Image (cartoon, rainbow, N blue to C red):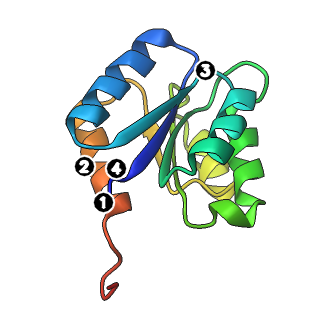
Amino acid sequence: MTKKILVVDDEENILISLEFLLRRAGYAIALARDGDEALAQAERFSPDLILLDVMMPKKDGYEVCHLLRQDPRYERCKIVLLTAKGRDIDRAKGLALGADDYLTKPFATRELLERVERLLAPAPGAA
């Protein structure tokens, strides 16, 4: 079954680039441009993983991450925060709010794909 990824970023160039990269890697993709749209798309699309920008209009990525983690429907969904905020305190905040990983922009596409593949891999011993 094809894994589904929701890409959330307010920068159109990043959305286009990540959509192309992830589709080419075989994933089904949905896009959102702000925090409110991210929550609506998560409900419609039921993603396996969300690539979530932190600095966005309406609701920032931290708030979206926190809201998703409060909803049992998304307990299995992986969340990767993508952000230009590279300080240790920013990373700690994201992980404390429930993110599974934190990647600082700019990032290498190979590194992003490796992290996505690792997070979406079946758990050891899973059938």
Whether residue 122 sits left or right of residue 42 in the image: it is left
Q: Are marks 1 and 2 in contact (CB under 8 Å)?
A: yes
Q: Residue furthest bottom?
A: 125
Question: What type is the residue that disc 2 sits on?
Answer: Glu
Whether residue 12 sits left or right of residue 66 in the image: it is left
Q: Are marks 2 and 4 in contact (CB under 8 Å)?
A: yes
Mark number displayed over residue 91: none
Give the Cα separation between the discs numbered 1 and 4: 5 Å
Q: Earlier in the sequence, mark 3 or mark 2?
A: 3
Mark number displayed over residue 116: 4
Whether residue 62 sits left or right of residue 114 in the image: it is right
Q: Are marks 4 and 3 in contact (CB under 8 Å)?
A: no
User: On the image, numbered disc 2 is attached to which residue?
Assistant: 114
Q: Residue 48: where, in percent of width, then height?
A: 48, 55
Give the Cα separation between the discs numbered 1 and 2: 6 Å
- Tell me the SS state at disc 1: helix
- Tell me the SS state at disc 3: loop
At label 1, counting other C-alpha atoms closer than 10 Å, the crowd grade (few under 14, some 14-19, many 20 or more) is few
Q: Look at 44% across and 43% down and name the residue there.
A: 5
Q: Earlier in the sequence, mark 3 or mark 1?
A: 3
Give the Cα separation between the discs numbered 2 and 4: 5 Å
User: On the image, numbered disc 1 is attached to which residue?
Assistant: 118
User: On the image, numbered disc 3 is attached to which residue?
Assistant: 33
Question: What type is the residue that disc 1 sits on?
Answer: Arg
Q: Earlier in the sequence, mark 4 or mark 3?
A: 3
At label 2, counting other C-alpha atoms closer than 10 Å, the crowd grade (few under 14, some 14-19, many 20 or more) is few
